[in-house]
């Protein structure tokens, strides 16, 4: 899988404040990459640097294997983006707003505008001035604008900001459909884990300008999912029993005698009985309380994310 | 650049600013013609077409044009900040210099159109009021003078663009243009008016500068103001972070 975005020691300093601090980020082709952090963590500054809107204090950005600052024009042509709430010319219709992008980029496909309006479900709202659009409609139009030129990389900064729960759901479905149908690499930032955890397959967690962790979501889920932990006298025999008697294969042995069972979460009594009946001493049974949200809270400190 | 210019024109669709600017440019000729017409009716002095055109150009250039063109300039450049559309344009990507250039081209066209409207309204008012001294040569000569004033005022838009981009707001631009206008009025008949770019522009266009200073001094002052504004704008806009 080739690398689409790679930043090296990316740093932005305002006065004495480091908004982004030696950030090393890697996004591979085809990934839906969640960029998670609290408000003010440095997400938008990073995204604006990726799009050439803000110049880094130091550090490098490579996109599609090329240096952004030496090939900015060519690179940006291959990217679609929506940074925070998208801005539009409110005296124009959706079609006219998209026409501005189409003219400048040189989109020659005749029905490209209609096609993208249909993708985002705005094809029946073409006569309405954008000034009369709701925030949700503007967000969808922002996605349409980002998709107009068939980008290979889509960068969306807080696309669900300000949307109501239904709007958030619609936006999530839209992004998911796009990833499936167009097979493009997507970077999506958010300060709310639950909004993007169903979408992304990789995640970077940023806090106070630093990228704390960059992991695949599968890894994260596994690392942070709930489990039953048994401390037993014979872990070999215990695991054999789990597999043969209860058909439990989703477990891990940690340290000596500590078995973590990731399935059958309500059946600790039955598992305990099985161990005891087979002469295995059980000195501790524990249900983990770690969930993904708690994990992020621990990682970035403070109360909640956002 | 053609496509970029097309999009700049498209952005004005349904914009009230365009019609308002036309109305604004018609104020000076109508005001001057009305005053001359009243004088003609009450004092029996025959109103002359050349006086109408000269007085219109004085009021238009010194009083109306600077704030009017300032508002247009602020509208063209500031709306990308106000409507938060700049981040879209620059990531399409539109090169920053091309964006400035396309707006300058539109501003030039807009200013020249308003100049023609002002001139046309003066001619129309004079014709309706049956002012004396109508001649083709007068019309052509005055059109040339109006156009020169328009071009010079366009060149002097660069500091206004710079202020708009740096302060990202209409209000400071309007305040600055009002200050320029006040100084215009103060210097309108002053012998040193050739040293102030905006009064020098009118003097050059109408050939009414006094010989206190060589004409070249006024040209140099206008050029330096325009070039300094241009350089400051380009340097600033190329480097500024877009938040």
Image (cartoon, rainbow, N blue to C red):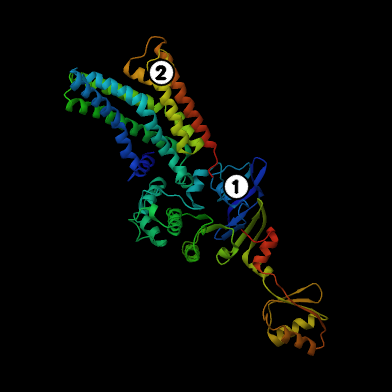
**Mark 2 and mark 1: Cα distance apart in space:** 54 Å
Which one is in front, B164 or A143? B164
Instruction: Using the image, determine if residue A30 lies above or below residue A58.
Output: below
Of marks 2 and 1, the one in the foreground:
2
Q: Can residue A33 be seen in this view?
A: yes
Q: Where is residue A302, by image quadrant?
A: bottom right
Q: Residue A173: which numbered mark, if any?
A: none
Instruction: Using the image, determine if residue B90 lies above or below residue B59.
Output: below
* Image quarter hosting the C terminus of chain B: top right
In the picture as drawn, the residue positioned furthest to the top comes out as: B211
Tell me where residue A143 appears, x and y as whole percent: 46, 56
| Mark 2 neighbour class, 10 Å CA radius: few under 14, some 14 to 19, many 20 or more | some
For numbered disc 1, what is the local secondary structure? strand
Q: Is residue A65 visible?
A: no
For numbered disc 2, what is the local secondary structure? helix
Left of A9 or right of it: where is A82? left
Left of B147 or right of it: where is A277? right
Tell me where residue B98 appears, x and y as whole percent: 44, 37
Please tell me how many numbered marks the rendered image carries: 2
| Mark 1 neighbour class, 10 Å CA radius: few under 14, some 14 to 19, many 20 or more | many
Q: Where is residue A265, by image quadrant?
A: bottom right
Which one is in front, A259 or A124? A124
Residues at circles 2 and 1 in contact by the CB criterion of under 8 Å: no
Tell me where residue A23 appears, x and y as whole percent: 65, 50
* Image quarter hosting the N terminus of chain B: top left
Name the residue located 20 percent from the left edge and 28 percent from the top edge.
Answer: B124
Q: Where is residue B94, by image quadrant?
A: top left
Tell me where residue A278 appears, x and y as whole percent: 79, 89
Query: Would you name the residue on which mark 2 appears?
Result: B187
Query: Would you name the residue on which mark 1 appears?
Result: A61
Instruction: Using the image, determine if residue B132 lies above or below residue B242.
Output: above
């Amino acid at each position: 899988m080739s690398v689409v975005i790679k930043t090296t020691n990316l740093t932005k300093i305002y006065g004495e404040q480091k908004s982004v601090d030696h950030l090393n980020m890697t996004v591979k082709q085809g990934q839906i990459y969640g960029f998670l952090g609290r408000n003010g963590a440095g997400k938008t500054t990073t995204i604006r640097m990726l799009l050439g809107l803000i110049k880094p204090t130091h550090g490098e950005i490579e996109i599609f294997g090329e240096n952004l600052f030496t090939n900015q024009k060519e690179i940006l042509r291959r990217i679609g983006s929506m940074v925070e709430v998208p801005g539009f010319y409110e005296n124009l219709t959706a079609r006219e707003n998209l026409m501005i992008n189409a003219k400048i980029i040189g989109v020659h496909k005749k029905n490209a505008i209609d096609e993208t309006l249909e993708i985002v479900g705005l094809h029946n709202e073409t006569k309405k001035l954008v000034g009369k659009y709701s925030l949700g409609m503007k967000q969808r139009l922002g996605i349409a604008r980002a998709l107009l030129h068939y980008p290979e990389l889509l960068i969306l900064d807080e696309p669900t900001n300000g949307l109501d729960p239904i709007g958030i759901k619609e936006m999530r479905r839209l992004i998911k459909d796009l990833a499936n149908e167009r097979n493009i690499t997507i970077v999506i930032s958010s300060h709310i884990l639950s909004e993007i955890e169903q979408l992304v397959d990789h995640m970077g967690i940023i806090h106070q300008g630093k990228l704390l962790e960059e992991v695949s979501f599968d890894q994260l889920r596994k690392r942070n999912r709930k489990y039953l932990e048994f401390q037993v006298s014979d872990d070999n025999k215990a695991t054999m029993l789990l597999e043969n008697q209860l058909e439990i294969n989703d477990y891990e042995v940690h340290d000596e005698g500590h078995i973590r069972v990731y399935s059958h979460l309500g059946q600790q009594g039955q598992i305990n009985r099985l161990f005891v009946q087979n002469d295995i001493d059980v000195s501790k049974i524990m249900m983990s309380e770690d969930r993904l949200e708690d994990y992020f809270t621990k990682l970035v400190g403070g109360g909640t994310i956002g | 650049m053609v496509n970029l210019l097309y999009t700049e024109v498209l952005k004005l669709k349904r914009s009230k600013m365009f019609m308002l600017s036309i109305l604004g440019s018609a104020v000076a000729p109508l005001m001057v013609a009305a005053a001359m017409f009243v004088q003609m009716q009450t004092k029996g002095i025959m109103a002359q077409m050349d006086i109408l055109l000269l007085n219109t150009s004085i009021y238009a250039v010194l009083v109306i044009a600077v704030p009017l063109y300032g508002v247009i300039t602020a509208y063209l450049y500031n709306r990308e900040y106000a409507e938060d559309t700049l981040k879209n344009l620059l990531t399409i990507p539109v090169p920053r210099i091309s964006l400035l250039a396309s707006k300058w081209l539109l501003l030039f066209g807009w200013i020249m159109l308003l100049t023609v409207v002002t001139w046309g309204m003066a001619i129309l008012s004079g014709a309706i009021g049956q002012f004396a001294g109508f001649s083709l040569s007068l019309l052509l000569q005055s059109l040339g003078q109006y156009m020169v004033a328009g071009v010079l005022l366009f060149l002097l838009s660069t500091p206004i663009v710079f202020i708009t981009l740096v302060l990202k707001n209409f209000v400071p631009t309007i305040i600055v243009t009002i200050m320029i206008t006040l100084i215009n009025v103060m210097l309108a008949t002053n012998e040193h008016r050739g040293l102030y770019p905006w009064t020098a522009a009118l003097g050059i266009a109408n050939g009414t500068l006094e010989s206190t200073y060589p004409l070249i001094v006024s040209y140099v002052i206008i050029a330096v103001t325009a070039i300094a504004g241009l350089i400051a704008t380009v340097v600033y806009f190329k480097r500024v972070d877009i938040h």
